[in-house]
Amino acid sequence: MSRRLLLALLALAAASSACDRPRPALESVGRHTFPARAGKLVQIDARSLDTSITVAPGDEIAVALRLAPHVSSTAQQKRWLERHQPVFEDSPERLRVTVPSRLPSFSVGWSAPSGTLSVTVPPICQLEVNTTSGDVSLDGSPALAEVRIDTQSGDLTVHGGVARLLVESVSGDVTVLGPPLALLDVRTTSGDVLLRAGCERTLVESISGDFRLLGLTGGLSSTTTSGDLQASFTTLAPGEAITVTSVSGNVTLSLPEVPLSGQVQTVSGRIRSRYEGNWQRRHRTLLLPARPGAVQLAIATTSGDVVLSHRP
């Protein structure tokens, strides 16, 4: 190897090492407060930033911001900070917090940026959150009457702070662990839904996402293509309705000791039931006779199996 070639290789290695060496991280932190009033709508469009919502009594809405670029050059860090600074628009009726939409930029070197919006909202307000890839968490008390969450790939975790929760998601998972809800309405493409909190009324729709719903105390409507449904009911009032439609997803229901009326049918799947009824089509259809005060059951699958059991 010639001396000139060797020197060139050493210079290239040194330049590469310099590019990869971590720079001291810049950070941007800040806190903003806005007046709250009954019915004021708080709209958050966080895009890729994670959003943490806390519901707490008070007369103001507080937004704390932390941005940490963690990219390989100081210039890239500054550009990232500039691109992710939220814009605030406040009026007596609405507070809008928006991370601007910008075209992605190309950069060379390592990159691990992160950012968080921490928002405190009084329970007298309304709340809507929209993200692309940012995760959302919700907690606190007393509960907001209703919260709407719209996310693409970000996950949602709820520990409290809401009575009626409405979610639209593409691939993000939804996990509800807090106090029981009055309403859960989730529409997702491939995200999974786990409900441990219990709910009075539940509506879920998915293509391939799985549903695991525990502690239900009221009606259920579920529509899936290939996702499985597992639902456990603590109580069911007379006249409540359970409606489930699936193509290839399996359906498993654990029910309290209540009378059932309606029909369970599958094209090519299997049905197993602890409840007595009239079997038809070689055990592919189960007819449950009409009874006073019965819970209305309507389950239909193409190839998915169905299991009806008594709750322990």
Image (cartoon, rainbow, N blue to C red):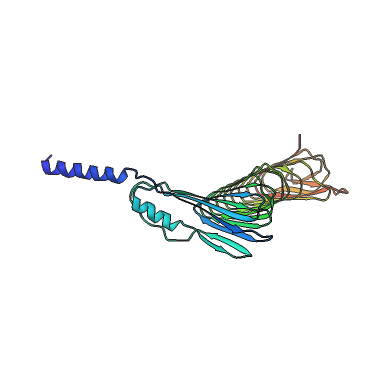
Residue located 20% across and 44% down the image = 11
Viewed as shown, does residue 242 lie left or right of 304?
A: right
Q: x, y percentage for residue 297?
A: 77, 49
Residue 251 visible (yes or no): no
Q: Position of residue 192 (x, y in %)?
A: 60, 46
Q: How many marks?
A: 0
Residue at far top of view:
312
Q: Is residue 215 above or below residue 166?
A: above
Furthest-right residue in this view:
292
Left or right for 41, reference 308: left
- Asked whether, in this view, residue 26 is left or right of residue 259, the answer is left
Nearer to us in this view, 235 or 99: 99
Residue drawn 38% across the image and 54% down it? 78
Quarter in which the N terminus is drawn:
top left
x and y percentages locating residue 20 in the rendered image: 31, 44
Asked whether residue 31 appears in the rendered view, the answer is yes
- At 14% across and 43% down in the image, what residue appears? 5
Report the quarter where the C terminus lies.
top right
* 135 vs 311, nearest the viewer: 135
Q: Nearer the viewer, residue 198 or 27?
A: 27
Along the line of sight, the residue nearer the viewer: 121 or 279: 121
Q: Picture coordinates of residue 198 (x, y %)?
A: 71, 44
